[in-house]
Structure formats: C-alpha cells, structure tokens
Image: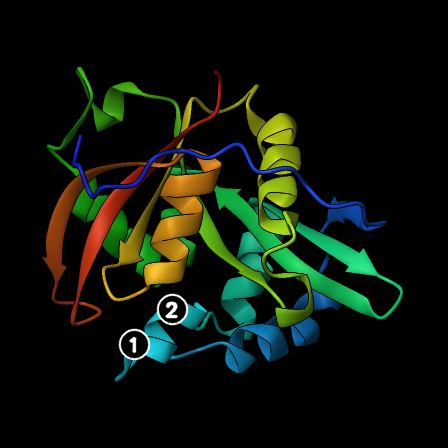
Amino acid sequence: MLDINLKLKKDLVENFSLKFRKANVEDIPTLIEIQKRYYNPDPDNDKERLSGFVSVVYQAQEWESLILNGDVFVLEDENGICAYTGALSPDHHASVPIFSHFKELLDGRKYREKMIDEYDYCFWVQTCVIDKYRGKGVVQYIYQKTKEAINHKYEIGLSGIDIENIRSLNTHIGKIGFVAFDLYADDYLNKKLYLVAYPLRK
C-alpha cells in the first residue's frame, strides 16, 4: 500500500433529496456535457489541481457501451443529473479503449496479498459531481449506493487517479476509502497516476 499521507474520514452527508438510479442511453448527451465541463487534461496551477477535474472524455459510443454492458449510476435533482459514477466488468474492456489499456497495466500486478486477476474486480468508471453539490457528501453517497448495488458481483473496483488531481485524491482516499497500491507513468495518457482499489465487501 502506498502512503500518500491521507486518512479515511467519516464525513457526514448533508441532508439532500437526490434520486439514485441506473443510467440509460437517453442520459448520454447530459453525461457528455458534464464531463466536458470538468475536463482538464493539463492543469497548470494549484487552483486547478485543487478544484477537481476529469482527465478522460468518453465518446458517445463508449458511454453507450458502459451503460449497456456495465453499471453506470446517476444522481438527479429537480434540474437533472448532478453526479455520475459506475463500474465495468473486465469482460467488456475491449468496448472502451481506455479500459483495454488499463487491463494491460494490471496484468502481473498485486493488490495486497493476491494477484489482481485472482479477484472478482471491476474497472471503476469516471466519477463527476457538479459544483453545486461538491463538499456536501454527495460523492460519498453515490459511491456508497453504487457499492451496495454491485458488491454481490465484485470484490474490488480499480481505477487510476492523476497525481495532479489533488481534490480527487483527497476525496477517494481520504473520504471514500480507496487504497493507493501502485504509482506508474502512463504513456497512453501521458500522465503519472496512482493505481487505486476500492474494497466493495467490507
């Protein structure tokens, strides 16, 4: 396990009324709009690193594959979708190029005491929460609800987090319970990433 000086915090979720549901293909234009709003492939100052961003943009056909073959979930308020996350089985990695690449990276790696391929694992889909709901426990809420929905299928969820994305690291490791277990230079994305795991059955 990598020590990046973050401890899990048990933050309280503020009171809010949001609908949790599975995404459908009709949501794709909204999901694309949200991810483009927060896409920042190369943050160049501390303010951008601390504000949180997404490093990858899924195309429409990739979203369709994620929704039809995976478990993508959204939160909605009265104005529409305000957060999304989800998981994809490695069986469907070929339909989304970034996950094919990620699967290759995981080959031969260990998490804790076992090789990755000894686990029932999933790829964790990109997560995003709109500004209005950041810092209010919404990201913890959507992760917990997603965990409850998929932990009968998977032991762990795996992802990579840009080392420049300070807000995401603080949230995923410090608040949600992800574990950083490796660090690597990703030539595909031209970034340095932490490999992280989300235990789903504890």
Residue 174 at x, y = what percent?
A: 39, 41
Note whether residue 52 is visible.
Answer: yes
For residue 17, above or below residue 164: above
Image quadrant in which you'd find residue 97:
bottom left
The amino acid sitting under disc 1 is Asp
Per the image, the residue denoted by label 2 is: 50
Whole-angstrom CA distance, mark 1 to mark 2, is 6 Å
Residue 141's disc number = none
Other-residue count near label 2 (Cα within 10 Å), few / some / many at <14 / 14–19 / ≥20: some
Per the image, the residue denoted by label 1 is: 46
Q: Quadrant of the N terminus?
A: top left
Note whether residue 55 is visible.
Answer: no
Callouts 1 and 2 close, C-beta under 8 Å: yes
Residue placed at 50% from the left, 43% from the top? 87
Depth check: give the residue in front, 53 or 190: 53
Residue 167 at x, y = what percent?
A: 40, 60
Check disc 2 and report its element: helix, strand or loop: helix
Q: How many marks?
A: 2
* Direction right: furthest residue: 78
Residue placed at 30% from the left, 55% from the top? 161
Residue 201 at x, y = what percent?
A: 49, 17
Image quadrant in which you'd find residue 89:
top left
- The coloring applied to the image is rainbow
Check disc 1 and report its element: helix, strand or loop: helix
Other-residue count near label 1 (Cα within 10 Å), few / some / many at <14 / 14–19 / ≥20: few
Instruction: Please state if 83 lies on the left or on the right of 112 as rendered.
Output: right
For residue 70, above or below residue 48: above
For residue 71, above or below residue 10: below
Residue placed at 72% from the left, 66% from the top? 27
The amino acid sitting under disc 2 is Leu
Instruction: Please state if 30 lies on the left or on the right of 108 as rendered.
Output: right
Residue placed at 57% from the left, 51% from the top? 85
